[in-house]
Image (cartoon, grey):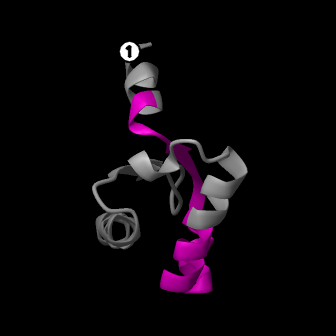
Amino acid sequence: MKEFIRQVTDLLRQHFPDSDVEFARAGPQRLGGLLAWSGFTGVEQIARQRQVWQVLRAGLPPEGQLRISAVLTLTPEEMAAARAG
């Protein structure tokens, strides 16, 4: 699982430079995570999800894609507010 987390993290960081990427287990074989990136500022949530999943579909085989349950997409400001409670 650690290798898969590293693979997904590296893939997203390549396409979303200077992003904050975090993943954790969301079940025995699945991941859930978040991606905070300044490029999401002013972009609607659905467009953010489309960007992320376009990268994941292009960079992972179908069985790898199925191992990702969700990726929360935030701006750095949204991330700071979420962490602040």
The total number of labels drawn is: 1
Residue identifier under label 1: 84
Kind of residue indicated by mark 1: Ala
Quadrant of residue 65 within the rendered picture: bottom right
In the image, residue 75 lies at what x, y percent?
A: 46, 39
Image quarter where the C terminus lies is top left
The residue closer to the viewer here, 2 or 58, is: 58
Q: Residue at x 51, y 48 (%)?
A: 40
In the image, residue 13 lies at what x, y percent?
A: 33, 64
Image height of 79 relative to 71, above or below: above
* Left or right of residue 74: residue 54: right
Image quarter where the N terminus lies is bottom left
* Left or right of residue 23: residue 69: right
Task: Judge whether residue 60 can be spotted in this image.
Answer: no
Image height of 76 relative to 44, above or below: above
Q: Residue at x 59, y 79 (%)?
A: 57
Identify the magenta region: 52-77
Image height of 45 relative to 17, above or below: above
Neighbour class for label 1 at 10 Å: few (<14), some, many (≥20)?
few
In the image, residue 84 lies at what x, y percent?
A: 38, 15
Q: Residue at x 53, y 74 (%)?
A: 55
Name the secondary structure under disc 1. Answer: helix
The residue closer to the viewer here, 41 or 66, is: 41
Image height of 75 relative to 20, above or below: above
27 in magenta: no
The residue closer to the viewer here, 40 or 32, is: 40
In the image, residue 70 lies at what x, y percent?
A: 60, 53
Quadrant of residue 81 within the rendered picture: top left
Task: Judge whether residue 3 can be spotted in this image.
Answer: yes
75 in magenta: yes
Q: Residue at x 46, y 23 (%)?
A: 82
* Left or right of residue 55: residue 35: left
